[in-house]
Every structure is written in structure tokens, then in C-alpha cells.
Image (spheres, grey):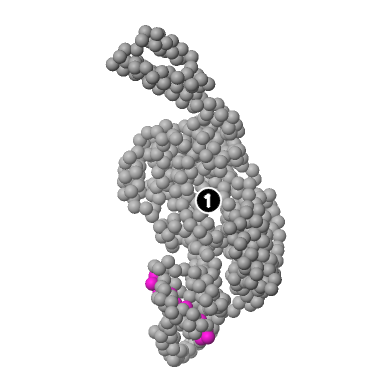
């Protein structure tokens, strides 16, 4: 290889001397240097030096960008920084769109970051309790092998939710956070613990089980935390909590977070907390956030509650709500009847399997269906920030449950609505709730049929106006002009389009007057059998929609519908049954037929004579003057 001339070598040495003066504002000097190296035949060593210096320059640029990013982050979330949150956690808070700390976060975070005192935090559901204890815990502990923080939660759903929230709050800090709960194979959780865990989140039962098996170490904790402590006490976990806390090391910090503060919590604090514990109370817990949650009730008879619920659903076209019932039977009944009427709802109660619970909760959070019917126990731990309504189908037994329920709406600065159905016999109970929450709950009339129709018209008009503003419908303009020529007037063509879209939804006669719903006499109805079911992806709302589109038969005209894995049973009036069979006769996908076996079974039931009642037994008269006979016997014996 030909050696470079001496003047070029001298020029190269000058470049090397000035290399460290190059900054981010003069990158072209380096490019000139690289081009120089390629243009002339330098030795291999010279080229290595050039590219090494180039790598140094790139590294300096990278470090400058990091410094710039840190400088920009220094001005982000100043209120969280003032509480003591480190720079390491700020990006995670920005990613979760945190703006300002909530009241409980403002009170609890400084207490947990400074000093060694135990803390009791009292705040309503949905006020950021998880971040209030999660951020200080994440900032304090360092990655290791044994659990440094134990968080007890009342339900599986809440355990999973807390673990997911802590993972998102930890950002890039390599902490292992594991949820431990029943319903999942314990061997899976044992394998997770074997890999090492920094924060364990779980239900009391599973935590005790894993500790008895020697898989969960509890003697090196920095923090032991009870979340939703009042709920755990209500669910009967008090003995389990005492046993778990007795297994932990005495030098840990103890934290309890709760929406209410019953005496049992204070007893736990006196037994397991240091005497000088702090209480962080976020406002008056006996009052609800009336600024964000609008509360009112409808007085309805028990037999009219379902009609009232359907009125609310129809009148609120963008409803996204949780409906609370007192018992599992009520949940199943309401869900079944609403599905039979074509509404998209799901049920959640204690008898549902864990896999189905997760499917229902995830579907509700993704708005695959707008209504969730649940019991109080099953709904614990479900965190949805944008609920529009909470509906008390059954009035709660006390004000604490009422506060927990309606605290699920009106979150994150959004307006929410809490509606309660009150029977005439429950007025006294409502007064007690009003007294406890120190707020009057006004009564309102249920929406009229005209209100429902007007709400649907308004929503449709708003969607049309929004579409016109964005201009996304321009590709249909020519087709619209063609349609306008079909009628004698453009309005006629538009009316036909509306008819196709709404069908009978805007006609008052399509709706049932409130309180007129009667139990249909299904004894004279025809029994139809459809050879498709849940395994084929069929749902009752889909079936009702298909029948309505093809025959015009409304859901209120049909009887009971039972959708099973591979078959669906439908009761219909004889004329309606004929319409359905005729409409689906040539469709192989929808194979209907008369269910002769069921009809024969019903006929056999009618022919059976009722069993004769056994004759009433004659009452044996006892002697009245037993006392006199007793004293007579005493006198004779003397």
C-alpha cells in the first residue's frame, strides 16, 4: 500500500489534536475527517484511530442527549418530586399520565419515605391508594432474591391488579413482582418464587399455603401492607391476617390502607404496629364526592325493577356501568333476562370459575359489553376509571357498602352517576344511608318512552355532525346523490335509510309501558330447536337480532330462550314460530325445527293428575285440669 504524503500526515495530526474540542454543534468536522481517511490511503492503524475517535464522539453525543433528557425531566411532575419521588420513577409516572398527586398520595408518600414509623392510610376506593404505598416501596427496596415487601389483598382480582400496577410504576427498575392467589396452579407460583421475588402480592389463604410449604419466606420483610383492610375483615380473614403477621420479622414497617376505619382495624394496629404509628386520612370518609358523582334514586316496586333497569339502559345510549345485586341468584336472574331481551351483559359472582372471571373482567375493561351485573364480594378489586354509572339494583345493607359501590364512578376528575332502585319498604334504609353519608339523595322519575327515543335521535345526530366535521364520509357523496334521486324528494330517500338503520327503535309502540310486563303464558307456546349454541359462537343477543331482522319479531314477543353448548331452545307463539321456520328454511347455518320431544314432555306434565293430599290428622285434646289432678294426687298420697 502506498504511504500517505507527509503533509497529509501532518494534517491528520492536526485533526487528532482538535478532536476533543468538537462538540455536538460541529459534527461536520468528523464527517470531513472520515472522508479524508477514505480519500487518502492511510495505514490501517491510522484508520483505526479515526474510527475510534468517531466512536468516542458518538458516545459523547449519546451522553449529551441523556443529560438533555434529565434536564427536561427535572421540570416534569414537580409536585411528585416535592414529595420525595426519585428521578428513576418519574418516567414511569409520565407514561401513566400522572399529573398531580391525590390527597392520600400527598399525605402518605412523605411519611413512608422519611422515618421508620408505621402508617394507616384512609381514603375512598379509586383515590390512588396503590400508588400511595407502591411508589415508596418501589423506591426503597433493591432487587434481591427473598421478598422484601408483602401486600395482602382480599380478592384474586385485586391481587392481580395491584401487581400489574406496581410493575408499571417500577418502570425500568428490575424488581420481580409476583401475584399469589387461589384459582391458579400452586406449582406455577412455586416456580415463580423459586426464581426470586422482591414484592409478593396475594390473598391470605394462598400466602399461608405457600409459607407452610416452605416456598415463601416472610422473615426478611421491609414492608408488610394490608390493602382494603376493612374488606378483608368483613370477609372473615382476621385470623389469617393475625397468623401471617405473626410469622413476619418484628423490625418491618407495617402499613394499612382502608376506605373505612372500623374498630377491628384499630385492634390490629394496636397489636402489630409500633405505638407511634401515623394516620394519613384523606378527607371525611363518611361523605362521598358529590362534586363528581351525581346521586339519585327511583322508587320502584320489586317486580318492576327489571323494567326500570331497561329504561335506564335505553335512555342512556353511552352507558358503561356496573349493576350491583345482593345475591348470586339475583345476578343470574337479571343477566339471563337482559340477555334474553337482546342487551349485552355479563355476570360476576362467587360461583364463577377463575378463568371465566378473568375473561369477564378483561372483556368489561375493553368495553366488549357495556354492563356488568355483580355482587359486592365478586366486584372487589375491579378497577375501571371511566364508568359512567353505578346502579344499585339492590339497595346495600349499610352506608359503607354504598360508599364502596358509588366510589367506582366519578374517578379521575370525570363526572359519574350513582342510581339506586328503592322499594317502598326500603325508604327507612335509604334515610339511614343519607344520614351516614351526610348527603341527601333526591328522587327522580324514570325516563319516559319519549325520552328514550329522543336520546337515540340525539346520539345519532351528534355522530352525523362529527362525521361531517371530519370529512370522512366524502367517498360516499356520489352514492348519496344517487340515492336522493330515488324518491320524489331527497328527504324520502333519507327517511328510507333511517328506517333501515333504526328499524322500529324510534316507534313508541315498540316499547313496553312501565309496569305492564306480565309473565308470559308459555304453556301454549311452540317449542323450537336450533342446532347451534355457544360452541358455535352464538349468543342470545345475536339470535334475537337475527330473528328480528328476518321476521320483524321483537324480543318481547318471544318466550324463554336457553342457549347451550350445541343447541338453543326457543319458545314462541304458534304464528311467530311459523314465521321463524319459514324465514330460516333455506339457511343451512340456521337450522330450526319443532322440538317435538319437549312438547311431548310438556303434554305429559299436563295430563298428570295432582296427588291427593293426605287427610289432616285430628288433634288429640289434652286434659285441661292437669294442675288440679296433680294436687289431688298429692293430697291422696298424704
Secondary structure of the residue carrying tag 1 is loop
In the rendered image, the residue lying farthest to the left is 1
Q: Taking 261 as reference, is 450 left or right? A: right
Q: Is residue 243 magenta?
A: no
Q: Position of residue 554 (x, y in %)?
A: 56, 76
- Which residue is denoted by mark 1 in the rendering? 383
Q: Residue shown at 42%/59% (left/top)?
A: 356
User: Which residue is at the front of the view, 369 or 501?
Assistant: 501
* Boundaries of the magenta span: 565-575
User: Which residue is at the front of the view, 586 or 78?
Assistant: 586
Q: Is residue 31 above or below residue 155?
A: above
Q: Position of residue 136 (x, y in %)?
A: 50, 35
Q: Residue shown at 45%/41% (left/top)?
A: 167
Q: Is residue 90 above or below residue 399?
A: above
Residue 141 visible: yes
Q: Position of residue 161 (x, y in %)?
A: 47, 48
The image quadrant of residue 44 is: top left
User: Which residue is at the front of the view, 503 or 634?
Assistant: 503
Q: Is residue 220 above or below residue 257?
A: above
Residue 544 visible: no
Q: Is residue 574 magenta?
A: yes
Q: Taking 105 as reference, is 186 left or right? A: left
Q: Position of residue 199 (x, y in %)?
A: 42, 39
Q: Taking 171 as reference, is 6 left or right? A: left
Amino acid at each position: 500500500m502506498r504511504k500517505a504524503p507527509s503533509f497529509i500526515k501532518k494534517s491528520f495530526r492536526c485533526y487528532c489534536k482538535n478532536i476533543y474540542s468538537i462538540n455536538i454543534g460541529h459534527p461536520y468536522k468528523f464527517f470531513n475527517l472520515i472522508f479524508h481517511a477514505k480519500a487518502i490511503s492511510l495505514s490501517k492503524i491510522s484508520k483505526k484511530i479515526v474510527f475510534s475517535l468517531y466512536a468516542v464522539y458518538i458516545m459523547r453525543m449519546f451522553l449529551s442527549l441523556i443529560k438533555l433528557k434529565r434536564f427536561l425531566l427535572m421540570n416534569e411532575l414537580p409536585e411528585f418530586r416535592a414529595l420525595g419521588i426519585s428521578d428513576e420513577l418519574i418516567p414511569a409516572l409520565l407514561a401513566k399520565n400522572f399529573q398531580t398527586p391525590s390527597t392520600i398520595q400527598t399525605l402518605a408518600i412523605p411519611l413512608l419515605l422519611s422515618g421508620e414509623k408505621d402508617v394507616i392510610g384512609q381514603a375512598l376506593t379509586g383515590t390512588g391508594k396503590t400508588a400511595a404505598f407502591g411508589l415508596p416501596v418501589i423506591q426503597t427496596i433493591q432487587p434481591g432474591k427473598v421478598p422484601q415487601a408483602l401486600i395482602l389483598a382480599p380478592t384474586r382480582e385485586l391481587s392481580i391488579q395491584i401487581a400489574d400496577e406496581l410493575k408499571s410504576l417500577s418502570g425500568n427498575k428490575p424488581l420481580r413482582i409476583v401475584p399469589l392467589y387461589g384459582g391458579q396452579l400452586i406449582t406455577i407460583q412455586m416456580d415463580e418464587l423459586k426464581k426470586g421475588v422482591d414484592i409478593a402480592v396475594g390473598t391470605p389463604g394462598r400466602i399461608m399455603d405457600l409459607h407452610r410449604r416452605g416456598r415463601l419466606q416472610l422473615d426478611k420483610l421491609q414492608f408488610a401492607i394490608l390493602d382494603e383492610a376493612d374488606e378483608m375483615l368483613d370477609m372473615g380473614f382476621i385470623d389469617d391476617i393475625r397468623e401471617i403477621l405473626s410469622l413476619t420479622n418484628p423490625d418491618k414497617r407495617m402499613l394499612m390502607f382502608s376506605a373505612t376505619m372500623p374498630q377491628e382495624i384499630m385492634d390490629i394496629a394496636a397489636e402489630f404496629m409500633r405505638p407511634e404509628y401515623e394516620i394519613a386520612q384523606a378527607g371525611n370518609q363518611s361523605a362521598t364526592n358529590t362534586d363528581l358523582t351525581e346521586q339519585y334514586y327511583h322508587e320502584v316496586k320489586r317486580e318492576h325493577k327489571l323494567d326500570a333497569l331497561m329504561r335506564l339502559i335505553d335512555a342512556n345510549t353511552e352507558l358503561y356501568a356496573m349493576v350491583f345485586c345482593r345475591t348470586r341468584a339475583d345476578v343470574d336472574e337479571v343477566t339471563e333476562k337482559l340477555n334474553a331481551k337482546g342487551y349485552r351483559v355479563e355476570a360476576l359472582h362467587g360461583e364463577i370459575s377463575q378463568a371465566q372471571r378473568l375473561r369477564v373482567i378483561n372483556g368489561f375493561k375493553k368495553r366488549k359489553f357495556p354492563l356488568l351485573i355483580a355482587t359486592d364480594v365478586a366486584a372487589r378489586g375491579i378497577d375501571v376509571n371511566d364508568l359512567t354509572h353505578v346502579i344499585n339494583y339492590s339497595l346495600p345493607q349499610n352506608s359503607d357498602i354504598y360508599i364502596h359501590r358509588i366510589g367506582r364512578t366519578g374517578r379521575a376528575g370525570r363526572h359519574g352517576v350513582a342510581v339506586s332502585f328503592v322499594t317502598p319498604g326500603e325508604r327507612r334504609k335509604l334515610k339511614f344511608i343519607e344520614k351516614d353519608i351526610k348527603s341527601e339523595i333526591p328522587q327522580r322519575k324514570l325516563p319516559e318512552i319519549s325520552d328514550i327515543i329522543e336520546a337515540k335521535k340525539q346520539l345519532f345526530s351528534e355522530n352525523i355532525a362529527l362525521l361531517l366535521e371530519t370529512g370522512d364520509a366524502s367517498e360516499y357523496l356520489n352514492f348519496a346523490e344517487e340515492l336522493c334521486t330515488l324518491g320524489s324528494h331527497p328527504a324520502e330517500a333519507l327517511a328510507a335509510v333511517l328506517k333501515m338503520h333504526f328499524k322500529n327503535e324510534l316507534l313508541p309502540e315498540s316499547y313496553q309501558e312501565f309496569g305492564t310486563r306480565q309473565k308470559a303464558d308459555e304453556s301454549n307456546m311452540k317449542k323450537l330447536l336450533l342446532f347451534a349454541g355457544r360452541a358455535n359462537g352464538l349468543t342470545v343477543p345475536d339470535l334475537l337480532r337475527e330473528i328480528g331482522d328476518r321476521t320483524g319479531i321483537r324480543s318481547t314477543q318471544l318466550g324463554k330462550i336457553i342457549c347451550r353448548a350445541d343447541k338453543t331452545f326457543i319458545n314462541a307463539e304458534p304464528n311467530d314460530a311459523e314465521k321463524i321456520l319459514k324465514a330460516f328454511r333455506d339457511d343451512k347455518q340456521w337450522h330450526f325445527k319443532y322440538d317435538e320431544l319437549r312438547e311431548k314432555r310438556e303434554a305429559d306434565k299436563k295430563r298428570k293428575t295432582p296427588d291427593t293430599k293426605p287427610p289432616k290428622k285430628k288433634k288429640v285434646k289434652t286434659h285441661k285440669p292437669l294442675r288440679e289432678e296433680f294436687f289431688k294426687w298429692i293430697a291422696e298420697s298424704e
